[in-house]
Amino acid sequence: QERLAGARRVAVLTGAGISKPSGIPTFRDAAGLWKDFDLEEYATPGAYARNPQKVWEWYAWRYQNVMQAQPNRAHALLAALEKRVGEGFLLVTQNVDGLHRRAGSSQLVELHGNLARGRCEGCGQRFSLPDPAEFVPPPYCPGCGGRGRPDVVWFGEMLPLGAFEQAEQAFVQAEVALVIGTSAEVEPAASLGRLARLSGAYLIEINPDPTPLSSWADCILRMGAVEGMEALMAGLN
Ligand code: OAD
């Protein structure tokens, strides 16, 4: 808390755990998506090439779920932290649910894309999907009419241009790095916490379960994202 109170450069990484209290499933927990869905069938370029309709239906279902969900108190407290810290703040998320922006965060990098967008397979243009109630996949590009794919990063794909570089810079420069609700198993996102620590940041992890990052952390809040953010922000004003 003291560290956070004085810090002018704060970098935050979030994962699926922060949206779990909003009712969005994680990937690797007991009830995680990768338990019920084989990622090789839904989240690789090969899966999409083999069966675009099946992949699209899964993404349309997830899009509908996240649009029905509401940001929770942990999302809101991160938006408040951004206001407090100012320009030295960056929030990097692996989540594709859009809940951080809906909670008011704007200094935000979405490393893995966003469920509410498509991306043209022809010209590469990104575009918003129709309202989930009206959306029948696949979408078509408003520019060239080409078929759109989900604007998310699949296994084996590159991150959006510049996104990781921006994240990396913030974590290298951070005085305090905060990593919330991620299993820290997917690279390169998982490396950000280590990078910050090696660059001299004070590293805080919020996660109810241990992760490979835990041994690197200066401070561990072994609790959910909401409770952890409330504990960190209590008394900061
Ligand atoms: P995971 O499902 O791998 O990890 C979720 C983490 O959240 C676990 O470490 C849980 O212990 C933790 N957790 C559970 N409940 C929590 C709570 N209430 N508060 C805080 N933490 C809680 O999700 P990610 O680490 O985000 O990639 O997964 C990383 C990437 O792997 C995802 O972005 C996705 C996936 O495959 C792509 O789709 C490209």
Image: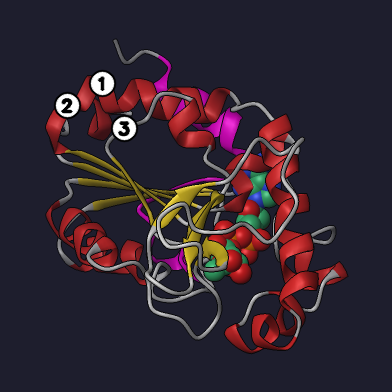
Q: What is the crowding at mark 3: few (fewer than 14 residues within 10 Å), some, or many (at least 20)? A: some
Q: How far is the residue under mark 1 from the one under mark 3?
A: 10 Å
Tell me which amino acid carries mark 2: Gly
Magenta stretch encompasses residue 229: yes
Q: Residue at x 72, y 45 (%)?
A: 135
* Viewer can see residue 208: no
Query: Which quarter of the image is occupied by the C terminus?
Result: top left
Foreground residue among 127 and 196: 127
Residue topped by disc 1? 83
x and y, in percent, of residue 229 in the image: 49, 30
Which is more N-terminal, label 3 or label 1? 1
Which disc, if any, is residue 86?
A: 2
On screen, residue 58 versus residue 129, left or right, reads right
The vertical placement of 39 against 166, above or below, is: below
**Start-end of magenta stretch:** 211-234
Q: Is residue 20 or residue 228 the one in the foreground? A: 20
Nearest the eye: 164 or 205: 164
Q: Are marks 2 and 3 in contact (CB under 8 Å)?
A: no
Mark 1 secondary-structure assignment = helix
The picture quadrant where one finds residue 198 is bottom left
**Secondary-structure class at tag 2:** helix
Q: Is residue 175 above or below residue 232?
A: below
Q: Which residue is mark 3?
A: 106
Percent position of residue 76, x then y: 48, 23
Instruction: Answer whether labels 2 and 1 touch (C-beta < 8 Å).
Output: yes
* SS at mark 3 in the image: loop
